Each structure stands twice: as C-alpha cells, then as structure tokens.
Amino acid sequence: NRPISYDSLMFTVNVSLINLGAFAYLRKGLQPISISLRLYPREKALLIMPSIFPILSVLGIYMMNLKNDNNLLIILLFLISAYVLFIGSIHRSVPERIYPMAIFFISVSLVLILGLRSDHLIGADIHNEYYIFARTINDGLWRYTSEYDPIFGLLEACLSISILPAIYQLILNVDPELLFKILYPTIFSIVPLVVYSLSKRFLTGFHAMLASFFFMSQLVFLRISYFPRTSAAILFFGLTLLAIFHDRINGHMKMALFAIFSFSCILSHYS
C-alpha cells in the first residue's frame, strides 16, 4: 500500500547494492580502490581562499535572513571575482589539479545564496513542485491523476520532484521544506565541473576554468534554486554530453550511460 516508505526503500536500496556489487565483481573481479587526495603546499595555499567561500555563503545568508545585512554576501562576490583574477595573473604556474576543486567551491557558494534565502520556498514553479513532493511523501506512493490538468498534468509525470526528493527525505528525515530548498542546488553544483571537463577537450586547463566561471556567472545559474526539476534535467543533460565525449569510456558503456542519462533527463523535466 505504501511502496515509497522507509522499509520498502531500505529493502530496495540494499538489494540493488548487492546486485551491483555482484555485477562489478563478476565483471572485473575484486579490484582495490585507490584514492589519492594528497595536495602539495602550493596547491593547499591556492585552495585556502575558495575553501572558505561556502562558509561565507552560509554565514552571509544567515546575516541576510536575520538582519537584512548583505555586506558579507557582497564581500563573497568580490572575493570570488578577485580570486579568479588572481589565478589568471599567475595561471602559468598554477597546477591544473586545483581547478576542479576551486570550481566546485565557487559553485556551491553561489547556488546556496538563493537556496538558503528565507525560511520558506522562493521561486516560480517550486511551490507546485513542492506540493507534488509532499503528496508523494504523505501518500507513500507516486501517482499520475491529472492527465488533463494544465499544471499538475505536467508536474506529476516528473520523477525528479516526486520520487527523488521523497527518497532523500525518507533517509535523512530533515525538515522537508529545507531539503527541497537545498537538495537541487547542491546536486546542480556539479554542472560547472561538467562544463570544465568538456571545455578541456578544446582549451587549456585555465581557459576551461574560465569557461566554467563564465557559466557560473549567468543569472540563470544564480537563480537555479527557483527551478528544481530544471536543475536536475540540466545536470543529466550535461552528464549525457560528458558520457558521449569521454575518451576513456568504451562503446557499450558509452551507449549505456547515454541511455541512462538521457532517460533521466526526460523523467526530470516535462516527462
């Protein structure tokens, strides 16, 4: 009666993980996982400033919500611009390894500004989308009932605003309105890294970083928390392009990833 419930979800997730683990083992055997996060002193020094950008973003929004004081946010925006100019002035001696981390820090700090503004939802379609999410949680199932409704007939078919946030809510058990405000901007903050990776096929590391920064400077990017399902769709669209143009993905896996990401894009926006 309630397929979207904690017990059903835990069963599904655990069975899926077991099956995927067995598939990975049969495909390549038991391969050791090696992750190197070692940074050299110069790289650490260059990442000190961007690492504090998300903290300034959260504190700035807190001051904005509490006292209507946007000074910290103005400082944040100036620091981000100054950091990019500084990197540009010394880019010949900057290790390319820091670019992805710097881009991610900047991206998170920018998308959270509007996402955390106010204690309630701000945006265009987000209120109707939140209703779909709340109804899915309360009913414990996804349903499509408004085929001829001009608004909900479109939104009910989008799994990115019904089943996806419901899964996160059941696992995290946080304030649902806060989850809806933060989940999509946080996921969307990966997209500038996709832009960087695609741009590196044609540009140097620094110029690819500039392309990513140009993408993050657009007004639509700063307002992405207005549009939850759109942010999910753009992410999957970017991942589709990344799968197509990635040189180290073979043909069969490339087609599989293309199908998965394309299908996810369709199910995210105007399904």
Image (spheres, rainbow, N blue to C red):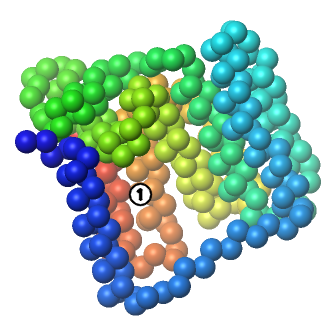
Q: Nearer the viewer, residue 50 or 247?
A: 50
Asked whether residue 117 is in view, the answer is: yes
Q: Nearer the viewer, residue 259 or 74?
A: 74
The residue sitting at 91% across, 49% down in the picture is 89
**Quadrant in the picture for the N terminus:** top left
The residue sitting at 40% across, 50% down in the picture is 236
Note whether 218 is above or below 151 in the view shown: below
The three-letter amino acid code for the residue at tag 1 is Thr
The residue sitting at 20% across, 52% down in the picture is 8
Give the quadrant of residue 81: top right
Query: Where does the image place residue 67, in percent across and percent down from the top left?
Result: 70, 9
Q: Secondary structure at mark 1?
A: helix
Q: Does 165 sit left or right of 151 as displayed? A: right
Q: Which residue is mark 1?
A: 240
Q: Does 35 sit left or right of 49 as displayed? A: left
Query: Where does the image place residue 152, in percent across and percent down from the top left?
Result: 20, 24
Asked whether residue 164 is in view, the answer is: no
Give the quadrant of residue 17: bottom left
**Quadrant in the picture for the C terminus:** top left
Residue at the top extreme of this rendering? 68
Query: Where does the image place residue 169, in percent across and percent down from the top left?
Result: 36, 39
Residue at the bottom extreme of this rendering? 29
Q: Nearer the viewer, residue 30 or 198?
A: 30
The total of numbered circles placed on residues is: 1
Q: Does 194 sit left or right of 85 as displayed? A: left
Note whether 116 is above or below 257 in the view shown: above
Q: Residues within 10 Å of mark 1 (few under 14, many from 20)?
A: many
The residue sitting at 11% across, 25% down in the picture is 146
Query: Where does the image place residue 98, in percent across and percent down from the top left?
Result: 76, 59
